[in-house]
Amino acid sequence: MTIALYARGKQWPLEGVVIRLRHSRIYARDCTDCVVRDDTMLDRIETEVQLSGALTLEQERRILEIAHKCPVHRTLRSQINIQEVTEPPATC
């Protein structure tokens, strides 16, 4: 959605976007980009982005740069702390 909104705002000839994701689990020791190198399992998400339309190389580069700034991408790249809150049942 971020890509489409950006391209539309710039009036660039983006005709379509296809994004493919592949999820796997790997050991941290097998991750060349990771700080932790132990037997911890990490989630790995591989992404593939296909843009269609008469875009210049510079437009494609900028669109992919913007895609990395979208809220979902930034959330997935950050350390996530999930806290579950269970509400007590309502009393009458």
Image (cartoon, grey):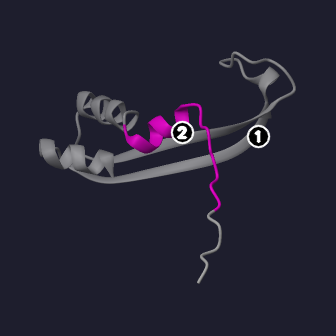
Say which quadrant the C terminus sits in.
bottom right
Residue marked by disc 1: 25
- Classify residue 65 by image quadrant: top left
Classify mark 1: helix, strand or loop: strand
Residue 36, placed above or below residue 20: above
* Label pair 1/2, CB-CB below 8 angstroms: no
Of marks 1 and 2, the one in the foreground: 2
- Please give the label number shown on residue 75: none
Q: Check disc 2: other Cα within 10 Å, few if <14, some if 14-19, many if 20+.
A: few
How far from the left and from the top, in percent, is residue 10? 13, 41
How far from the left and from the top, in percent, is residue 29? 81, 21
Residue marked by disc 2: 76
Q: Nearer the viewer, residue 53 or 68?
A: 68
Q: Check disc 1: other Cα within 10 Å, few if <14, some if 14-19, many if 20+.
A: few
Please name the residue shown 33% across and 52% down the image.
1
Residue 69, placed above or below residue 88: above
- Point out the residue furthest to the bottom here: 92
Boundaries of the magenta span: 70-86
Three-letter amino acid code at the position of disc 2: Leu
Q: Earlier in the sequence, mark 1 or mark 2?
A: 1
Decide whether residue 22 is among the magenta residues. Answer: no
Q: Is residue 87 left or right of residue 26?
A: left
Give the distance between the C-alpha atoms of the residues marked 1 and 2, in whole angstroms: 15 Å
How far from the left and from the top, in percent, is residue 81? 61, 38
Please name the residue shown 35% across and 46% down the image.
51
